[in-house]
Image (cartoon, rainbow, N blue to C red):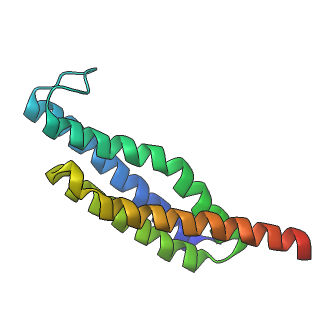
Amino acid sequence: MYHFTALVSVLALMLYFYMGVRVAQARARFGVKAPAVTGNLDFERTYRVQANTLEWLPIFLPAMWLFAVYVSDGIAALIGLVWIAGRAMYMVSYAKAAEKRGPGFGVQALAASVLLAGALIAILWRMLHG
């Protein structure tokens, strides 16, 4: 059973849902009517946080699950929590200023890379030493 990875998956999706709510709130606050995604820099930064997170979810979630299956549920979940923390850092810092988004982005990119590389190595190891 992969309870820890499942829990972290739900937490990641909850963070993404929250980002979507923030976009809806920003639309109302800054008067950006759908389908527009430009016109106010504060709105655009909020929107990009949500969009960039969506762009990373197809990398993060499968990598975390493959790592859980082939390496460890607990370690996958811990690295997944680091990814969530990085995304939260990214959200807070990018909302303040675009140039402040780097550290949060780096944390989440590193976490996703570790999960992806770890899963690949473990899969290849099992294929060769099966």
> Residue 6, percent across and down?
53, 64
Q: Quadrant of residue 36?
A: top left
Q: Is residue 105 left or right of residue 113?
A: left
> Residue 21, percent across and down?
25, 42
Q: Determine if residue 7 is in view.
A: no
Task: Quadrant for the C terminus, please.
Answer: bottom right
Closer to the camera in the image, 43 or 13: 43
In this view, 59 is above or below 46 = below
Task: Quadrant for the N terminus, please.
Answer: bottom right
> Residue 32, percent across and down?
16, 25
Q: Determine if residue 39 is in view.
A: yes
| Residue under the image location 26 percent in, 55 percent down | 91
Closer to the camera in the image, 45 or 68: 45
In this view, 102 is above or below 48 = below
| Residue under the image location 56 percent in, 69 percent down | 114
Q: Is residue 99 left or right of residue 71?
A: left
> Residue 26, percent across and down?
16, 37
Q: Quadrant of residue 88?
A: bottom left
In this view, 46 is above or below 5 = above
| Residue under the image location 36 percent in, 59 percent down | 105
